[in-house]
Amino acid sequence: MFKVLIPAVACVALVAVSARTQTFDAAPAEPAMAWRLAYEGPLAKLTYGAANSDQLAVMITCEPGQGDAVVYGEAHPDSPRLVQASAAPAPADPLTGGAAYETRIALDDPTLTALASQGALRLVGDHGPLVLAAGRADRRLASDMLAYCGSSRA
């Protein structure tokens, strides 16, 4: 009986240790991309990217009373009213090596207001068009930023 019992127990223990080892050896998941709103002095920053990192898909900044926002990222809003923010091309993004666009867009541009009202920001970049989605809480962040920047408070 011990001839059968000892190998069976050893096999069950080996399977249990193997399953446990695989769980702990799993590679960490990619950081979750999410919308975040922060204020730095009078500047409001709405970003879509990984928390506590420089990994951003897009950053939208604005100040109260300015009437427009600056958009920075690998893609730019899909709007005919877009204005290039600088005369010289932006240097390559150090994280991805791709082009980093810096553009200006009016706060009331439909492409920007659609983020708050419909939960979608249409962008165009080197890899073609893309849409960044925003849930209900994220739409509220976009709405808060647009209301803040559209006001005259500084």
Image (cartoon, rainbow, N blue to C red):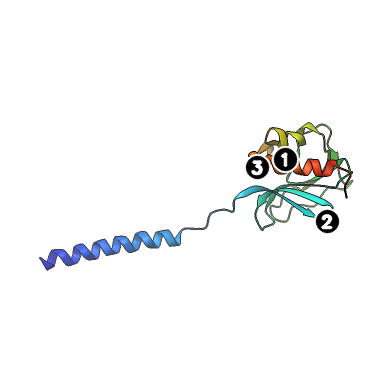
Q: Nearer the viewer, residue 80 or 87?
A: 80
Nearer the camera: disc 2 or disc 1: 2
Q: Amino acid at mark 3?
A: Ala
Residue 103 horizontal/vertical position (percent): 82, 43
Q: Earlier in the sequence, mark 2 or mark 1?
A: 2
Q: Quadrant of residue 127?
A: top right
Assign a secondary structure to mark 2.
Answer: loop
In the picture of the structure, the residue carrying the numbered disc 2 is: 41
Q: Which mark is residue 147?
A: none
- Residue 73 lies, in percent from the top left, at 74, 47
In front: 129, or 140?
A: 140
At label 2, the amino acid type is: Gly
Front disc: 1 or 3: 3
Q: Which mark is residue 125?
A: 1
Q: Quadrant of residue 10?
A: bottom left
Query: What residue is at 72 percent from the left and 40 percent from the top?
Result: 125
Query: For mark 3, what is the residue?
Result: 137
Q: Nearer the viewer, residue 118 or 95?
A: 118
Mark nearer the N terminus (1 vs 3): 1
Instruction: Say which amino acid is labelled 1.
Output: Gly
Density class for disc 1 (Cα within 10 Å; few <14, some 14-19, many ≥20) is some
Cα distance in 3D space between marks 3 and 2: 23 Å
Residue at mark 2 to residue at mark 1: CA–CA distance: 30 Å
Residue 69 in sight in this render: no
* Residue appearing at x 12%, y 67% in the figure: 3
